[in-house]
Image (cartoon, rainbow, N blue to C red):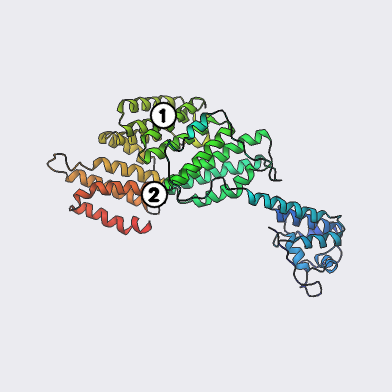
């Protein structure tokens, strides 16, 4: 909020930053004062208008201050949006410049807008201890399928949202997605949450036409989906579920079936990670259904692949294999240039990763090892992907202690070698999923704790990854 801010009287003030008695337009151009980006903030709007009236009346900062009993320095700072004016300051400026009350009305309007924006609730309430709940408590699929379209309180702010705002938000999607892919959900999660609350939320409550509304809802949905995924990756499952739900509501309001399918697939992945096959299948099937309406083969392929993982988790090998065949068939029909930006990562190599994870869930270690080289080759520079893939490969080598085998040394050594590779990529990683993937292999290696190679892995983990965590 703006506050009253008055400095020294004119007689006590320091010399003006630009000393001149008479101001002409040519002199103003010669001085080249700092340009104000009037749209940047309410203060800059006010400062630009104050400068306009001062120059219109041909006054310097000190001349105006001598009339209003303010320091020329203060007036200059208000014009540059470096100080916040109070209402009494606006009134004095109106009187000294004979504006007819323009500046006071602007001050009132700015503060009314600020109050309204402050009253806007966050898109997703910050409740870090909220637990993840199953379909018996929370069923976003039914919300997606029902006929009611979510309505957002538009027009409660004086601000007008346009194509430039939408373009900036889409560019931020790329920034946050890249941060998440490389270093994990914890790296920029808090920053994205702040961006949603400070920029996206107020934009949703601003004024815009119907065409802009569809794009605004879509980009807001994508940002909420990214935030949900970051929370999921950071072991904040309940909070992530809330973001996913809001993302799905926004996608429905935008009419974007491809984005809705993508969000439902992320929810299926979260349920799979939490070992909830019922919800993983429910979300996955709904994602496929939405993808069928989207006209996006890549989206449909990813949906089928995650549905295959859900079937594998439930132990249905036949249905899992059928879904993977369908995923491959759909991806062959995709034209990357025609696909939405957020799904273009889903290539043949990413499909190989899904084949690997399905094989892992289906307890087929040889198939994991067959697909792993291509997956790891595609993970260069993508630390989280590398960790997840390498840990999955390492797990495939760990022998079952209960199984009869003459010598398990070679298999344990292979598992440890791959796990050490995963740990190198995990240094600095802010992904709870990634660290847990490593820890699962460590627990599977526990029966072989007397082997030197396993002890070496443990020592390396404690001296590198554990310290970073």
Residue 307 x, y percent position in the rendering: 39, 31
Q: Earlier in the sequence, mark 2 or mark 1?
A: 1
Name the residue at the left extreme.
406
Determine whether the residue tagged by mark 1 lies in a helix, strand or loop: helix
Left or right, 365 with reference to 408: right
Q: Which mark is residue 432?
A: 2
What's the residue at 79%, 57% (across, down)? 50
Q: Nearer the viewer, residue 184 or 109?
A: 109
Residue 318 x, y percent position in the rendering: 31, 25
List the residue tagged with mark 1. Answer: 304
What's the residue at 50%, 39% (across, down)? 245
Q: CA distance from mark 2 to mark 1?
A: 26 Å
Q: Nearer the viewer, residue 321 or 37?
A: 321
Determine whether the residue tagged by mark 2 lies in a helix, strand or loop: helix
Q: Which mark is residue 82?
A: none
What's the residue at 28%, 46% (across, down)? 441
């Amino acid at each position: 909020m703006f506050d009253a801010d008055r400095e020294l009287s004119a007689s006590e003030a320091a010399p003006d930053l630009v000393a001149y008695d008479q101001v002409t337009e040519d002199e103003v151009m010669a001085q080249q004062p700092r340009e104000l980006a009037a749209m940047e903030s309410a203060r800059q709007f006010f400062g630009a208008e104050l400068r306009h009236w001062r120059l219109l009346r041909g006054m310097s900062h000190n001349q105006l201050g001598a009339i209003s009993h303010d320091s020329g320095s203060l007036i200059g700072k208000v014009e540059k949006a470096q100080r916040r004016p109070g209402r009494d300051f606006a009134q004095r400026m109106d009187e000294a410049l004979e504006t007819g009350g323009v500046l006071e009305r602007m001050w009132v309007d700015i503060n009314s807008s600020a109050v309204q924006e402050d009253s806007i609730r966050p898109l997703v309430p910050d409740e870090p201890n909220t637990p993840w709940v199953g379909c018996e408590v929370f069923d976003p699929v039914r919300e997606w399928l029902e006929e009611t379209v979510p309505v957002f309180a538009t027009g409660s702010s004086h601000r007008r949202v346009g194509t430039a705002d939408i373009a900036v938000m889409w560019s931020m999607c790329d920034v946050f997605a890249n941060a998440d892919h490389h270093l994990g959900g914890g790296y920029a999660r808090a920053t994205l949450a702040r961006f949603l609350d400070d920029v996206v939320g107020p934009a949703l409550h601003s004024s815009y036409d119907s065409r802009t509304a569809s794009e605004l809802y879509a980009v807001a949905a994508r940002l909420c989906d990214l935030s949900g995924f970051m929370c999921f990756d950071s072991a904040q499952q309940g909070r992530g579920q809330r973001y996913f739900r809001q993302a799905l509501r926004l996608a429905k309001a935008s009419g974007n079936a491809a984005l809705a399918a993508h969000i439902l697939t992320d929810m299926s992945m979260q349920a799979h990670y939490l070992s909830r096959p019922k919800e993983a299948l429910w979300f996955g099937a709904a994602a496929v259904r939405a993808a069928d309406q989207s006209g996006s083969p890549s989206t449909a392929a990813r949906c089928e692949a995650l549905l295959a993982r859900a079937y594998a988790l439930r132990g249905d090998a036949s249905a899992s294999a059928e879904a993977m065949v369908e995923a491959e068939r759909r991806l062959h029909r995709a034209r990357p240039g025609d696909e939405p930006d957020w799904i273009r990562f889903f290539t043949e190599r990413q499909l190989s990763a899904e084949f690997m994870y399905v094989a892992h869930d289906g307890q087929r270690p040889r198939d994991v090892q067959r697909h792993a080289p291509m997956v790891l080759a595609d993970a260069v520079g993508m630390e989280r992907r590398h960790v997840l893939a390498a840990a999955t490969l390492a797990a495939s080598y760990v022998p079952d202690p209960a199984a009869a085998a003459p010598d398990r040394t070679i298999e344990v050594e292979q598992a440890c070698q791959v796990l050490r590779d995963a740990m190198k990529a995990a240094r600095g990683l802010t992904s709870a999923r990634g660290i847990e993937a490593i820890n699962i292999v460590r627990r599977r290696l526990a029966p072989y704790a007397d082997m030197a190679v396993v002890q070496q892995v443990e020592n390396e983990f404690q001296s590198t990854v554990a310290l970073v965590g």
